[in-house]
Amino acid sequence: MEDDLMQNTNLEQDFLLFLKEIQGYKEALALMEWDSRTISPANALESKADVIGFFSTKIHKLSTSKKMGDFLKELKKKSNNDVLHEIIRVCEEDYSRSSKIPAEEYQEFVTLQSKAEIAWQEARNKNDFSILSPYLQKLVDFNKQFANYWGYEDQPYDALLHEFEPGMTTKKLDAIFSKLKKDLVALLTEIKHSTKDNHTFSLNESFEKNEQNDFIVYTLKKMGYDFNRGRIDETIHPFEITINPDDVRITTRYDESDFRMALFSTIHEAGHALYEQNIDKKYANTPVFDGASMGIHESQSLFWENFIGRHPLFWKNNRDDFLRNAPKSFKKVSFDDFYKQINEVKASFIRIEADELTYCLHIILRYEIEIALINGELKVEEIPKLWNDKMEAYFGIRPKNDLEGVLQDIHWATGDFGYFPTYALGYMYAAQLYQKASEEIKIEELIEENDLIQIKAWLSEKVHQLK
Amino acid sequence: MEDDLMQNTNLEQDFLLFLKEIQGYKEALALMEWDSRTISPANALESKADVIGFFSTKIHKLSTSKKMGDFLKELKKKSNNDVLHEIIRVCEEDYSRSSKIPAEEYQEFVTLQSKAEIAWQEARNKNDFSILSPYLQKLVDFNKQFANYWGYEDQPYDALLHEFEPGMTTKKLDAIFSKLKKDLVALLTEIKHSTKDNHTFSLNESFEKNEQNDFIVYTLKKMGYDFNRGRIDETIHPFEITINPDDVRITTRYDESDFRMALFSTIHEAGHALYEQNIDKKYANTPVFDGASMGIHESQSLFWENFIGRHPLFWKNNRDDFLRNAPKSFKKVSFDDFYKQINEVKASFIRIEADELTYCLHIILRYEIEIALINGELKVEEIPKLWNDKMEAYFGIRPKNDLEGVLQDIHWATGDFGYFPTYALGYMYAAQLYQKASEEIKIEELIEENDLIQIKAWLSEKVHQLK
């Protein structure tokens, strides 16, 4: 199929060149975003937000231009090439949604996104939600407006969900999440009252950043993350970003009093990165070079973080390597105790540090707040109280401050509403993939043999390469 | 004057917005160039070169567009604002030169520049000039063609010189350089036969990178380099790059067996950075936000590197701080011996490691080769031999390989011919500035008091802020 692209008509070639031009802007934009979130000098951030806004608008304009519309109309009639068909399908979906938002409004939105992100960091620094609040209210209003532009059958929130998980609806999620919430709250209550909690040691020993990093890099290489086509840097809120198909970066945050923070979040982001490093290159320089949906993308990160990274057999194999640089006290801990503690279940405040059991409860809390915001039943300034009330109701604990609550995540500050549910969906997809991998490649044996590359290869074939 | 910009006519405002748009592209381009030269994953470099080429072309197109021409024509008639006048003057100079190069030819040139830079790195890795040679020949041909487009009175090389040092001519340089060469060669010969070389210790002790870095950061802060508006990273060939007025980055290269490499090259690049961090912000987002000429820019880096950084009084003050992390053997060296050795004069192969006396000889060698190339008297493949012959004639030493010769500098690989002479001019300007500073601010006293910030302030007032 790749060869077919070489024999394209002029129209098709022109179209691919046009997409490559858009991709050039996207590449610059991704690098500027990476830079802003990792290493940029502090004083330059505000003016960078302007330039980021300018580029986002430029991309939006090109993706919704008459030129794009004309290309799509003409090519749909003529093209009988499978690769191109898929490219056209994705461009059309994007074109159709994007062109419903007026250009100026979109420009305002992206400038606001960047500024809100800076406000979020400042709000975190000062532990003051009111710094972020006015930006957030505007972002909510934009999202409500976008939902109207995009249209929906049942609820406005469906229109937002579609952006991240095409085909998913509030109705479906309500059904899944209400059952899940009931069961999880019950299970968590039971665990809280259990007397089995018997660990007598702490994993919160001081563990120097550079020492942590050795095992992280070792693990990433085991997983098949290609350092010639990526790199790892530090940030506040870890993320994966694709600059181009040969530059897929991950970021992490070190907590020297809890190695689990960096280790598991890096394995998580590397799961995303393996997806992006293994998408079929025939889609390079087109919008198809991306995950199938956010839920599917998240299934990859959660698969690696929880189904592999917290698996007892993974630790049986790698514990010695881990212990080499670890605090001395860790060496006295029995394997069972160690394993149990990295899989410990408990009510906690921070989503990205949450265990497998409670994670989806964090998502459901956010989901409920998002729906109330988009339906106009909740004002932004009321979020902190509602957040904390829900934490108390579902987890039995109440945040001391908003850093432990609403200020922990970047997503709303970047204007993304309808994104959080895909994390819970990712969990469910990952569990299904693991089940399938047990049947098809005897995954437990591979973990036991420490042959993670084979697992990556299976995921590449079954998930990364498919469209 | 800044306020005047607020009261501009619509035409003036539109013009400034247009320049800001161009600046957006320049900012993205600068970040991509910085990234490619410092931290980018290796496999991504080639496709990045394409995107860099795309953006350079875009900037070129906008700077030479009919829109730019119309703005300049209209504004010249109307504007009576000093700031705007200066902006128009610089844009017009750029417009006039750039629009003489056909757009496709320019695009080819910039794509070639990026690819040649990659070839240069590969040629260095493999110590094989023939990898770079075909790219270099094309870059020379482009430069010859550009000289024809731009026009010249006397020699084609004059047209290239003008790009970096407006008003400078081959005739003037021939006069200066021929005298300088004669005197320097004579002096170097005399030094070589001197029996005064009596150092009995070595500064080439193993000195760990991180340990070196402490004193470097300390020195940059003393000089007034603002880390909230910049950062320092590693690269092969150190450079300074301005992403935007609040993000002025420098890079360095560590040699653990010779601390002088990183220390003096960093002070050098910081001299450039101080210039860029202190240009009047009323010129931000316009092409005036730049040095007056490359020679003037270089005067700033050389001023700091050699006139301050190698000054005995600087070391009287800071030697203890330096010695804190330095190899133990350094502590036994007397101040005089230490001072003499960091100011040691000797024939050497690498320009950026050269001492004050021999530096200009390195430049004259390159200048002579450039003229021969541009006049068509020399083919690129003949450079290595001619280079080595000249090294032998002027310095009395012959490179063992091209890493010690033609492959050491990046400039030709980035297509810059006519740039090298500005380094020698920078030396002469720096000497004149130092003389002036002795009269106006008693600079020796300031160095003695370790009050380098006052020196920066004087340079900002007398050089950085003037146009």
Image (cartoon, coloured by chain):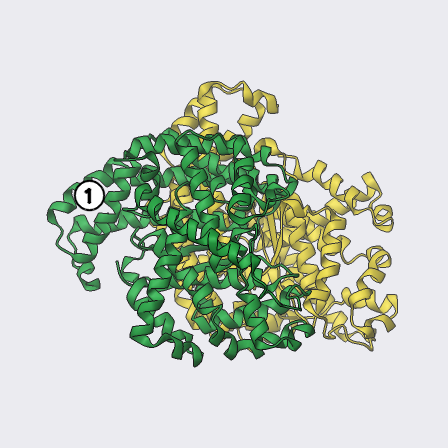
Chain colours: A green, B yellow
Residue plotted at (25% across, 48% down): A90
Residue A332, position as x, y percentages in the image: 66, 77
Label 1 sits on a secondary structure element that is helix
Compared to residue B341, the image places residue B228 above or below, namely above
Instruction: Examine the rendered structure and indicate whether residue B29 appears above or below residue B207.
Output: above
Q: Position of residue A325 (x, y in %)?
A: 64, 74
Note whether residue B160 is visible: no
Left/right placement of residue B421 relative to residue B16 reads: right
**Which residue is painted at 74% across and 67% down in the image?**
B345
Which amino acid type is marked by label 1? Leu
- Mark 1 lies on residue: A72
Q: Horizontal and vertical percent for residue A67?
A: 24, 39
User: Which quadrant of the figure contains the N terminus of chain B?
Assistant: top right
Q: Residue at x 42, y 74 (%)?
A: A452
Q: Which of these two is toward me, B337 or A105?
A: A105
Location of residue B202 by image quarter: bottom right
Residue A302 figure quarter:
bottom left
Q: Position of residue A147 (x, y in %)?
A: 33, 34
Pinpoint the chain carrying mark 1: A
Q: Is residue A150 left or right of residue A245?
A: left
Which quadrant: the C terminus of chain B? top right
Which one is nearer the viewer's eye here, B176 or A329? A329
Circle 1 packing at 10 Å, graded few (<14), some (14-19), many (20+), is some
Choose top left, top right, bottom left or bottom right for residue B59. top left
Q: Is residue A301 left or right of residue A441?
A: right
